[in-house]
Amino acid sequence: MGGAEGCCYIKVYLPRGCLLLSIRSVFVSLSVCDILSVKTFGLDSIMETEGGPGLNVQKKGIMKKPDPVKPPPNNTEEEDLEGRDMQKEALNRRNAWEPSVFYSLGNETFFFTGQEISIRESLDSFGAVIWPGAVTLCRYLEKNREQVDMLDKAVLELGAGTGLVSIVASLLGAWVTATDLPDVLSNLNFNLSRNTRGRCRYTPQVAALTWGQDAKRNFPSSVYHYNYVLCADVVYHHNFLEDLLITMQYFCKPGTTVLLANKVRFQSDLRFIENFKNVFNVTLLEEIPQEEVRIYHATARK
């Protein structure tokens, strides 16, 4: 970090405390203590300020609930083995999506719905990485617009991460609320704001949501109802799969459709899918064997 100003280009991945920086093609591994030093260097404040105005986002220390009522459209021109495996996948991910992704330091560029989407990576663990399920779900939404009509629909994304799926849903005309853990929201806010401002019928919202804890308090069912709940690569090696399923059940009311896109990595993924099928009416919409990704359609059981 000690070079001349303006000459340091950084590629950041932070899966489970491992940070890899690319500085003029010199790779340096940093410890957790080094990461804390980087954060105090000012990157946190950069992420906090670059997002800009326009999104309904929960700032640090301010608990703001997302709006429950859809506003009028905007005026626009167009109106540990497992952990290591996840780290390895994060570091190798760029090879999986060529040529549809054009790689540059700190950003990834996608093209969906005729729009260029630029996604900035961050220092937020697995929230820093765009996973295969997100890209696959975006492709599905783009090519199946008649079957999955996003126009003027209320859409909730669980575990939105860098925000790619929420951005594409917004560009397709949905009124989107993107949710994730509080420490992910700054970069999520930045990416949504940069890629949707002036392009979408509705301004997307960003809100903190901890699975199994916040839903009833911050999203009372008497007020909040969503046409679609989107989930992309939220099932992997973590200890909150039961909480995730409970959260999905809470938001999936009569008239709600859950779309789950996930890469199958571990036995725990398969167990979750079995539990998912026991709770919802589930249909396999698409399977991409070469990418090991499946997309499921689910509705509430009567």
Image: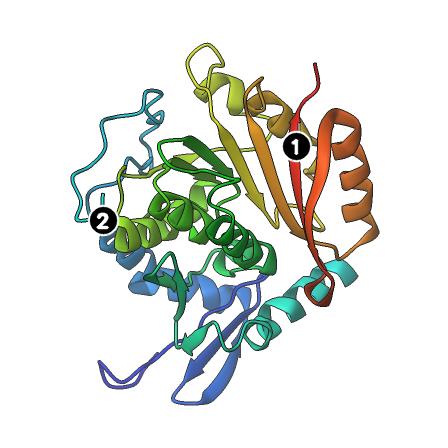
Tell me if residue 283 can be seen: yes
- Give the label, 2 or 1, closer to the camera: 1
Q: Residue at x 57, y 57 (%)?
A: 136
Q: Residue at x 56, y 56 (%)?
A: 126
Q: Which residue position is annotated with label 2?
A: 197
Horizontal placement of 141 versus 241: left or right?
Answer: left
Residue linked to disc 1: 298
Amino acid type, mark 1: Ala
Q: How is the image coloured?
A: rainbow
Q: Is 44 placed left or right of 302 in the picture?
A: left
- Please tell me in which quadrant of the rendered image residue 69 appears: top left
Closest to the observer: 146 or 52?
A: 146
The answer to whether 282 appears left or right of 128 in the picture is right
Image coords of residue 140 (percent x, y)? 54, 52
Q: State the SS at label 2.
A: loop
The correct choice, above or below, for 18 with respect to 286 in the image is below
- Give, as a three-letter code, the residue at label 2: Arg
The quarter of the displayed image where residue 292 is located = bottom right
For the N terminus, give its image quadrant: bottom left
**On screen, residue 249 above or below 20:** above
Q: Does dot 1 land on a helix, a strand or a loop?
A: strand
> Where is residue 179 shown, x and y percent of the image?
45, 38
- Please tell me how many numbered marks the rendered image carries: 2
Q: Earlier in the sequence, mark 2 or mark 1?
A: 2
Neighbour tally class for label 2: few under 14, some 14-19, many 20 plus, Cα within 10 Å: some
Q: CA distance from mark 2 to mark 1?
A: 31 Å
Say which of 17 and 91 sits in front: 91
Q: Quadrant of residue 65?
A: top left
Question: Does the image show residue 16?
Answer: no
Quadrant where the C terminus sits is top right
x, y percent for residue 232: 58, 48
